[in-house]
Image (cartoon, coloured by chain):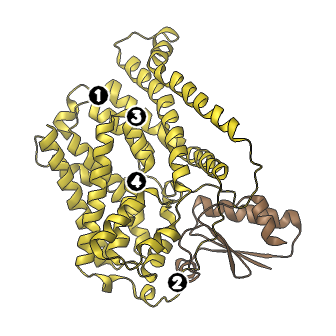
Chain colours: A yellow, B brown
Amino acid sequence: MLKSMDETACTCPTPEAGGQEIHSNPSMWMLALAAPLGIALWWLVYSHLADFSRLLTYQLMPLTPGSRLGAALEFFFYDTPKVMMLLVLVVFGVGVIRSYFSPERTRALLAGRSLLVGNVLAALLGIVTPFCSCSAVPLFIGFVTAGVPLGVTFSFLIAAPMVNEIALGLLYGLVGWQVAALYATTGLVLAVTAGWIIGRLKLERFIEDWVQQMTTVGQGSVEARMRLWDRLVYGKDAVVEIIGRVWKYILLGIAIGAGIHGFVPEGFMASVMGQGDWWAVPLAVILGVPMYSNAAGIIPVVEALLGKGAALGSTLAFMMSVIALSLPEMIILRKVLKPQLIGVFIVVVATGILFVGYLFNAVMG
Amino acid sequence: MEIKILGPGCARCEKTAKLVQEVVAETGVDARVEKVTDMMQIAACGVVATPAVLVDGDLKSTGKIPKKDEIAGWLT
């Protein structure tokens, strides 16, 4: 799934927010009534998806249960609405949370922090701050010139794309809360550790010179104060924008997952991505580098791989590598970072991912 | 009036530029619309999140695609 930067890089969570008081404020009663109703409806549909997909594949189409094509199609019909519904819920919820944060506010919170505290804070903020990979460079510069330490900035830059609400929501829905929690925790620990190491190595001299000469500190953002209704609209806009952008990749990912589910024999993955061979994890990491996928597309593939016996550690390593070690983002960061620093970044993050892979292969079995 | 749209060229920045141009055309305001894609210039404006819009040197919007009525408000 090799894609160009323009199309996929901006899995940007910040939607077209209405700034000032543009919307009239409907009564809180309407909201209070609509919300539980909406959730109940959502749940009703969601819990019947498996039956629905079986109905579609085996009753309405002349396919026999147990056939490979049948299995693949059933997976596809089940996963597609499931993923879409999950996404809508997750993106909306996180969108509302994110309306409370902004890169400028995060920068202010992180400026001048001591190393370890800063790393942890940065990684945590990376999850909730609206961040677009296309603004990685301006963000980097803005952070560094405002006095956010280099290592702390890196913790943010690693956590933000990786511990992404879409990834977590999908993992939770498709694979289970344990894997989702695992992924979130290891992603954060990786971000903190890698950022801390980079900070300790004192690599400031490997920032491109023109950045160091920059003295302008940001003018700050033009945030308007948002009321609850505005935040809900923000969430709704996030859903429209993000899903409008990623739905094709999701379908592609589900299609690939369906193919794997239907046509790849059980246990085949165990031989390729199983935990036995020592080279399984490094292979998974290397495979992930040239691939750039937004989190949404890769997770149905992950789900199918795991279902076919791929080891958890190798699969997690693959997923993290696809997201965190993305070639297009490195190329973009080359504008502000000298090759040595990029090299260190790759080595530190890759090592961390390898460690995660081995650890989970060993522990989960 | 001089309007600058800052962004490295991704879909959101293009959309912002398009919206601004539409609003300028619709309101008939005499404004020069410029797209800035160079990272150095963007950073020099102190912008942390793109797309961003500057009107006559004033930062009006960062990190999001502005709505049309918002843009119209800046032009008056």
Q: Position of residue A239 (x, y in %)?
A: 58, 45
Q: Residue furthest front?
A: A29
**Marks 2 and 3 belong to one chain:** yes
Q: Chain of mark 4?
A: A
Few, some or many C-alpha atoms within 10 Å of disc 3 (few <14, some 14-19, many ≥20)? some
Q: CA distance from mark 2 to mark 4?
A: 32 Å
Circles 4, 1 touching at the beta carbon (< 8 Å): no
Residue type, label 2: Val
Lower position in the chain sequence, tag 4 or tag 1: 1
> Mark 4 falls on what kind of element?
loop
Which of discs 1 and 3 lies nearer the camera? The answer is 3
Q: How many marks?
A: 4
Residue type, label 4: Tyr
The residue wearing badge 1 is A264
* Residue in the image at 81% along x and 65% along y: B72
Q: Is residue A236 left or right of residue A351?
A: right
The residue wearing badge 2 is A217
Q: Is residue A126 or residue A157 the one in the foreground?
A: A126
Circles 2, 4 touching at the beta carbon (< 8 Å): no
Lower position in the chain sequence, tag 2 or tag 4: 2
> Mark 3 falls on what kind of element?
helix
* Residue in the image at 24% along x and 48% along y: A284
Residue type, label 3: Gly
Few, some or many C-alpha atoms within 10 Å of disc 1 (few <14, some 14-19, many ≥20)? some
The residue wearing badge 4 is A292
The residue wearing badge 3 is A173
Q: Chain of mark 1?
A: A
Few, some or many C-alpha atoms within 10 Å of disc 2 (few <14, some 14-19, many ≥20)? some
